[in-house]
Image: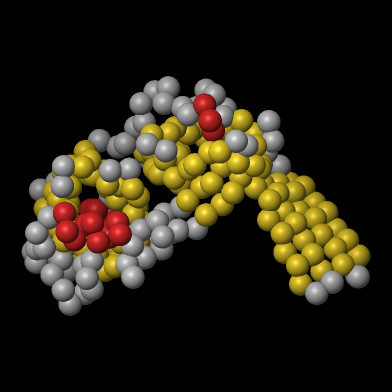
Amino acid sequence: MRKKRLHRLASAIPLLLVAALLYPATAAAFKGTYAGEFNGKAARAELREEAGVVRGTLVIDGYTYRVVARPSGGRAAGELEDEAGVTVPLVMTLEGGKLGMAIYVQGANAPATRVLLSSAKPSRAPAGEIDPALVGHWAKSESYTSGDFSAAAETNIYLLPDGTYRFGASKLYGGGDAGSFGSEGGGGERGRWRTANRILYVLDAASGQWSAYARYYVEGNSALLTFGNGKREVWERRR
């Protein structure tokens, strides 16, 4: 059963056929930020180009979808994936600064739902929009066991109240009948973070654009992060 969010895309507006727009386009042509509305809800797409592939996100009313498409013959065809990992076919077109997204919610052989957005400035979270519930030192622990061998890893990150973050040193240790080992390294990476509608955003220093990192839920000293592909991680507050 497809996720309710994708069904909502189909029922919110009349189903439309994809417009076949024939004009030259490349992956770089789709790169940019686009904004508008879908069924009265704010919608925003942020696209980038990586090795000839268009990647990015589509956010509708705070819900994030992942976009992956390859340009060909004036279009970019690929897939749209929701936060539970459900994917549907997607075709994008671009004309006069207007981004058309045809989403085949019911499959490639059914009519498509259309989202139309206009070129916009890169998304920049409002200054000072920092959720205090996320401020602090957080750590994620993972473990692995196979036979007599076991290993554990820990990743640390500091979300600071001034809107910057810093990764601390990661730790890896384990052992078995053959002996034990341990190492510590990495860390030091820094950047900027913001929040909006319970979504954690990070700033891409290269492009100057904010992108959705994960949806979050904090309860006590635990934080649940849900990523665009449906993967979930639990982080624990250290202080």
Viewer-side residue, 96 vs 148 = 148
Q: Is residue 155 above or below residue 88?
A: above
Q: Is residue 98 visible?
A: yes
For residue 165, side relative to residue 172 (left or right): left
For residue 171, side relative to residue 213 (left or right): right
Residue 126's spot in the image, x, y percent?
Answer: 35, 26
Residue 6's spot in the image, x, y percent?
Answer: 27, 60
For residue 113, side relative to residue 190 (left or right): left
Residue 199's spot in the image, x, y percent?
Answer: 42, 40
Q: Is residue 50 above or below residue 190?
A: below
Viewer-side residue, 217 vs 168 = 217
Q: Quadrant of residue 128?
A: top left
**Quadrant in the picture for the N terminus:** bottom left
The type of colouring in the image is secondary structure
Residue 159's spot in the image, x, y percent?
Answer: 57, 32
Q: Residue at x 29, y 67 (%)?
A: 88
**Quadrant in the picture for the C terminus:** top right
Q: Is residue 234 above or below residue 114?
A: above
Viewer-side residue, 15 vs 75 = 15
Q: Quadrant of residue 67?
A: bottom left
Q: Residue furthest bottom?
A: 109
Q: Residue at x 15, y 47 (%)?
A: 39
Q: Residue at x 42, y 38 (%)?
A: 198
Q: Is residue 24 visible?
A: no
